[in-house]
Image (cartoon, grey):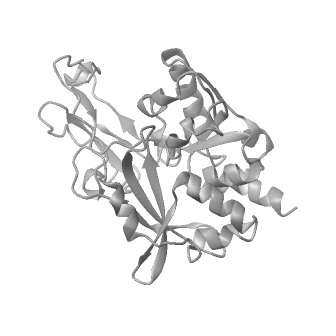
């Protein structure tokens, strides 16, 4: 049985579960809750998800009479899944997708189509604009959740003003790594696994390195968790987070390095972290928080 704690950070369930950080004043704050009563602890107890630019994190401790207590009587709720029939509501082709259009400037169209089909990437037309749909499928090909993002067809950059989860009022959806279903694909059963932050970077990694590695994405720096890595047992895993600004309070590399050391001891898999970007990036590239995808695009046009 999974061990649960009396107090934990509230799981993301949409904008209602994000609050204004007491430090940076951005709406990126996750509060601690009592897992038994579902009540919030005092506002000061929580974590800012802007770990690089803010880093605020205050957790309950003995002085506050809040102790992390294992609750052995708690039973894990059954995971809910989305109906894959939702795929029928998306576009039949990706030719109008801004990210697809951008990638055609660097890679062959048929190669892009192959990779998109592997990852089950879709396109949705919303209010006259085309969105990129990133589904999260697990090892049993269950549809865990769907992430909707908007990209610029000229720059390939995502719109930071638009981000949506497909949420059909299910209360216990549970995320997994983007691309997880490919672990059992015949082409990748023995491949080394590289985990990056963004879904776009995972696609670029596959396009550039072909079948040399299998790229998976967490969907964000804070989403690298033990639970998400459990399906990777007996596999060789390499982590490659985004770069961090030179004046950051916390570095993404250090954060994932600590995680890799911890999870390597707790899981039956080899987890290491690549310092390729850290050693080769300029200060400008670090301050722009570039990732492997940016390096790949520059390499392709050489």
Residue 80 placed where, x, y %? 26, 44
Q: Residue at x 67, y 46 (%)?
A: 246
| Position of residue 48 in the picture relative to residue 300 (left or right) | left
Q: Residue at x 78, y 50 (%)?
A: 282
Q: Residue at x 21, y 36 (%)?
A: 33
Residue lying at the far left of the rendered structure:
37
Q: Residue at x 67, y 33 (%)?
A: 191
Residue 48 placed where, x, y %? 39, 45
Residue lying at the far front of the rendered structure:
186
- How many labels were placed on the picture? 0
Nearer-the-camera pick, 16 or 21:
16
Residue lying at the far bottom of the rendered structure:
128
Residue 28 placed where, x, y %? 38, 52
| Position of residue 199 in the picture relative to residue 14 (left or right) | right
Q: Is residue 116 above or below residue 73?
A: below
Q: Quadrant of the N terminus?
A: top left
Residue 169 placed where, x, y %? 21, 56
């Amino acid at each position: 049985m999974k061990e649960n704690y009396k107090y934990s950070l509230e799981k993301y369930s949409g904008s209602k579960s994000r609050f204004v950080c007491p430090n940076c004043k951005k709406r990126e704050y996750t509060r601690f809750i009592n897992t038994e009563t579902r009540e919030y602890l005092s506002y000061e107890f929580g974590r800012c998800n802007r770990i690089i630019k803010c880093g605020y994190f205050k957790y309950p401790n003995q002085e506050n009479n809040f102790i992390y207590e294992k609750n052995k009587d708690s039973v894990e709720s059954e995971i809910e899944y989305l109906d894959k029939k939702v795929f029928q509501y998306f576009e039949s082709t990706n030719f109008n997708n801004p990210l697809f259009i951008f990638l055609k400037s660097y890679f062959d169209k048929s190669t892009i189509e192959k990779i998109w089909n592997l990852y089950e990437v879709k396109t949705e037309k919303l209010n006259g604009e085309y969105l990129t749909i990133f589904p999260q499928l697990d090892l049993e090909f269950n549809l865990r959740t769907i992430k909707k993002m908007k990209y610029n067809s000229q720059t390939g950059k995502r719109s930071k003003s638009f981000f949506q989860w497909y949420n059909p009022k299910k209360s216990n959806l549970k995320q997994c790594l983007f691309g997880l279903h490919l672990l059992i694909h015949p082409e990748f059963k023995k491949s080394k696994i590289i985990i990056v932050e963004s879904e776009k970077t995972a696609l670029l990694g596959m396009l550039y390195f072909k079948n040399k590695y299998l790229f998976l994405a967490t969907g964000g720096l804070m989403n690298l968790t033990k639970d998400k890595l459990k399906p990777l047992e007996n596999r060789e895993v390499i982590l490659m987070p985004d770069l961090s600004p030179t004046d950051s309070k916390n570095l993404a590399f250090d954060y994932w390095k600590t995680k890799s050391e911890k999870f390597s001891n707790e899981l039956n898999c080899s987890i290491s972290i690549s310092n390729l970007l850290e050693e080769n990036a300029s200060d400008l590239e670090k301050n722009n928080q570039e990732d492997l995808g940016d390096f790949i695009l520059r390499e392709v046009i050489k």
